[in-house]
Image (tube, rainbow, N blue to C red):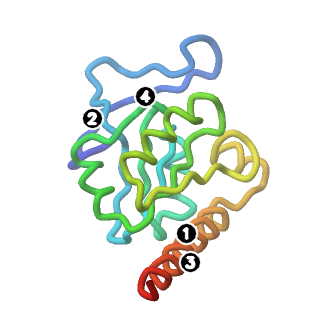
């Protein structure tokens, strides 16, 4: 991970054996961010998924990679998320990325967070490997959420 032009975390994925990931001691453990001026964000678990989303659709949104389903925003990440209109939570579609993690996101950002798992596979990397379009998947998510928010605002104005 690079912040302010410096390497602050190095995480190595081993091709086999345990542990699967090794983090070099002394690494900074905050979430990885790929910020933009756009007020949309997507939350993923792994740094590799974050890199993939940034590569395929980084011009559409901010990308946050937590490092794990239990990861939470640090102060810098929390400030970024406070300014978002929509946050898609695309944690891995497994037990760890499931109910407990989702409940925290829903409670913390109730007005703007939407759970948005990949249509196929466990995570964005699996979906991409199976031929899925990461950009199209995220576009549909943001479009659906924004349309829903607009409908709610119209209904509230009528009330």
Which mark is in front, 1 or 4?
1
Q: Is residue 140 left or right of residue 38?
A: right
Q: Which of disc 3 and disc 2 is earlier in sequence?
A: 2
3D distance between C-alphas at marks 2 and 3: 39 Å
Residue 86's place in the image compared with 49, above or below, is below
Q: What residue does disc 3 label?
A: 147
Task: Give me the residue at 54% from left, 80% from top.
Answer: 151
Q: Is residue 60 left or right of residue 79?
A: right
Which mark is in front, 2 or 3?
3
Residue 30's place in the image compared with 22, above or below, is below
3D distance between C-alphas at marks 4 and 2: 10 Å
Which mark is in front, 2 or 1?
1
3D distance between C-alphas at marks 2 and 1: 34 Å
Task: Give me the residue at 78% from left, 55% from top.
Answer: 131
Of the numbered discs in the image, which one, if any, rests on residue 145? 1
Task: Give me the residue at 36% from left, 37% from top.
Answer: 72
Marks 1,3: beta carbons within 8 A: yes
> The N terminus is located in which quarter?
top left
Q: What residue does disc 4 label?
A: 11
3D distance between C-alphas at marks 4 and 3: 38 Å
Q: Position of residue 59 (x, y in %)?
A: 46, 69
3D distance between C-alphas at marks 1 and 3: 5 Å
The answer to which of 148 and 69 lies nearer the viewer is: 148
Q: What residue does disc 2 label?
A: 8
Task: Give me the residue at 46% from left, 19% from top.
Answer: 22
In this rendering, the count of numbered labels is 4
Q: Give the secondary structure at mark 4.
A: strand
Q: Which of disc 4 and disc 1 is earlier in sequence?
A: 4
Q: Is residue 12 left or right of residue 82?
A: right
């Amino acid at each position: 991970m690079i912040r302010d032009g410096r390497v602050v975390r190095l995480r190595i994925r081993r091709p086999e054996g345990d542990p699967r990931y090794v983090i070099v001691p002394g690494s900074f453990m905050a979430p990885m961010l790929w910020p933009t001026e756009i007020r949309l964000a997507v939350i993923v678990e792994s740094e590799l998924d974050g890199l993939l989303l940034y590569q395929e659709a980084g011009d559409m949104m901010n990308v946050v990679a937590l490092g794990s389903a239990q990861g939470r925003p640090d102060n810098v990440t929390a400030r970024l998320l406070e300014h978002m209109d929509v946050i898609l939570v695309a944690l891995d579609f497994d037990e760890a990325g499931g109910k407990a993690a989702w409940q925290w996101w829903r409670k913390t950002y109730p007005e703007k967070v939407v759970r948005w798992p990949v249509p196929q596979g466990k995570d964005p990397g699996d979906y991409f490997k199976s031929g899925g379009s990461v950009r199209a998947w995220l576009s549909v998510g943001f479009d659906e959420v924004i349309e829903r928010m607009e409908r709610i605002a119209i209904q509230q104005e009528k009330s």
